Amino acid sequence: MDHSLLKALVERHGLPVIDDASIDAFFASGGPHALLFFSGAGAPRPETSDVAVLFPELLKVFSGQVRGALVAPEAEAALKNRFQVFVFPSVVVTRDGQPVAVLPKILDWADYRQRIAEALAPDAPVLVAPQKPRTEFAHVHRA
């Protein structure tokens, strides 16, 4: 995907482009839920253009419930672990700046709607980053 499609999303839909320096200010400036678009624009992927077309439509469907932002291509590497993005493109549903759902590649329209609606539920759990295994050694003293 070339950057002209991202530029069109910004110009036509007024979407902000966020990076690792501005993302926390983005979360602080609005409601609790947001959709983030990680395009993977640095490496061409056929699905990215499809998701770019659907992203503003998702924002319309969930208007009043979510805000949207594009993650700057140069910031994706710095932010992908924070939001548990392992595949590009991905749409991330957040609550209070924490990932609630990651929707990788392209999905059916009904799947997007269902999974985002589930992620917006007040009881939807926040995703927990995978932890490295921890080993604890206990010394047992035998008398």
Image (cartoon, rainbow, N blue to C red):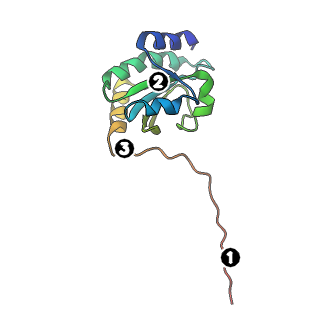
Residue tagged 2: 69
Question: What residue lies at 52% left-to-right and 19% top-to-bottom?
Answer: 48
The answer to which of 95 and 56 lies nearer the viewer is: 95
Question: What residue lies at 36% left-to-right and 43% top-to-bottom?
Answer: 124
Decide if residue 90 is on the left or right side of residue 116: right
Q: Amino acid type of disc 2?
A: Ala
Q: Can the viewer see residue 136? A: yes
Residue tagged 3: 124
Label 3 or label 1, whichever comes before in sequence order: 3
Q: Can the viewer see residue 92? A: no
Q: Amino acid type of disc 1?
A: His
Looking at the picture, how far across and down is residue 54, in whole percent?
41, 18
Residue 84 quadrant: top right
Residue tagged 1: 139
Residue 120 quadrant: top left
Q: Rounded to the nearest whole Å, what is the CA distance between mark 3 and mark 1?
A: 41 Å
Looking at the picture, how far across and down is residue 13, in whole percent?
41, 13
